Image: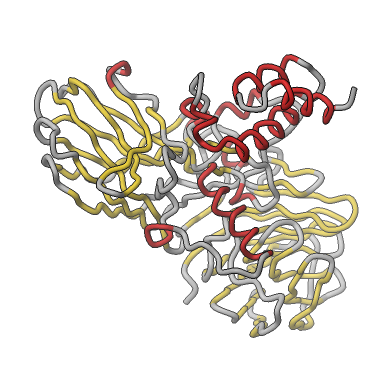
Amino acid sequence: MPNHALMIMALLYAPHDFSKGQMIVNTAGWDTDCNAGNLGCLHGIMLGLDGLNQGPDWRGPLADRMLISSADGGNSINDAVKMAYYIANLGYALAGEALLELPKSGAQFHFSLPGSTQGFQIAEGTTQLTNVGVKGEHHNGVEMLSIDFDKLTMNSEVFCTTPTFMSHEVLKMRTYDLMATPLLYSGQRLSAQILLQSDTQGDVEVSLLIRCYGLNDKLVDHESEAATFSAGQTASMDWTVPDCGSQPIAELGVVIRSKGSAQTGRVLIDRISWSGTPKLFLTRPEEPGDFWHRAWVNGVDVFTAQKFKQSFHISQERGEGIIIHGTRQWTDYEVSGDISLHLGKYAGLTARTQGLRRFYAARITRSGNFELVRTFDEKTTVLATSKFPVELDKIFKLSLRVSGRHVHAQADDVNLAFTDQSPEAMLNGGIGLIVADGAASALFFNVSEAV
């Protein structure tokens, strides 16, 4: 019996019951993950949120969280709200209609769909777990994230976070590896719009929070300066993300603390967003751990974490391979690094990387050239080139700067530039290290504003 027959059977036996349909299709066997997902999609279209909200709580434990393994790693740590807007806009684009604008000035977390939490849950470190809760809340005509607390004392605190990178749970995944890059980076500017509900008893302190990986992949907390909120007060909070020492940021959220005794109330988050160019020095951290290495999408045969003195050592037996870091929210910046070609046709840096086959690259070739190239799907175009003596195993200082449609590459003292007015021009994306038919390495990468 094929999988689609099980889906049809479950839909026929439970046409108006999401929970019963899931019970049937999961207990029928075969590829239960695919079957359950496809049936759930059909029931969602047919029944809407009301159908999902009947029976057991399906939405609460998931909290809108989605993991989508992708070579375009900034899309991997995702949520149902972001994907709902993305899919809806695909439909509008196909129909030739105007796209939906993201609410609240394009904030990454805007909670604008009914009941949405965009991954936020009560997190480790919270005391009095039985007295707190998180949900999407309609407040004065606006959808917000609600964090409720009861009898919050000066000796207790509430941590509420959402993932910005993969968690320790990925170590338990079988069969499939999660390819992902972090969403948030050191040097970017965090902003939040927060309200303390008017019937809250007493004042509370709120801090913005990030959790990055550290020694042996334990999470390390960094908090902004606390802001004091009185009942009914709304305020904006801004914070520059601190240096995390080449470690990825795993979570983003808030910490709520009492200013008095046994307080009961509700903090409402209208939006959280971030912007700006990351300020990064990427190298192998001194403290033992693995997640710094997992923060790169691995598109090579071998990406070695510890064996070589170089922080990043990659090899590709045939064709081109790449490792990728960053997201499509990166626009204008400069990436630099000390690069070596150990064997092969060429090696180099990439910028505005949008997966395995879309990027600009500054590459040195074994044939003795320095090249600025654009790779767009199956086509690679040399935009500028210069003779350049290349020795295997020698360290070369490479940089690649992107600003608007201008691309500038440098290898030691040799400069190349190009203004890309083509339809294939890329205006955003992360960084990468490439190699073809051999091995290459980098001691470090530095990411900064394009000057």
* Image point (27%, 41%), residue name: 268
Examine the rendered structure and indicate whether residue 245 appears above or below residue 256: below
Pinpoint residue 404: horizontal percent, then vertical percent. Answer: 55, 78
Camera-side residue of 15 and 237? 15
Camera-side residue of 144 and 444? 144
Is residue 417 visible in this depiction of the protein?
no
444 vs 425, left or right, is: left
Say which quadrant the N terminus sits in.
Answer: top right
163 vs 316, left or right, is: left
207 vs 95, left or right, is: left
Pinpoint residue 260: horizontal percent, then vertical percent. Answer: 9, 27
* Image point (19%, 23%), residue name: 152
Examine the rendered structure and indicate whether residue 446 appears above or below residue 23: below
Is residue 298 visible in this depiction of the protein?
yes
Report how many numbered discs are placed on residues in the image: 0
Pinpoint residue 332: horizontal percent, then vertical percent. Answer: 52, 71
* Image point (66%, 62%), residue name: 353
Pinpoint residue 238: horizontal percent, then vertical percent. Answer: 28, 54
* Image point (84%, 66%), residue name: 378
Q: How does the figure colour the protein chain or chains?
A: secondary structure
Camera-side residue of 56 and 73? 56
Q: Which picture quadrant has residue 351?
A: bottom right
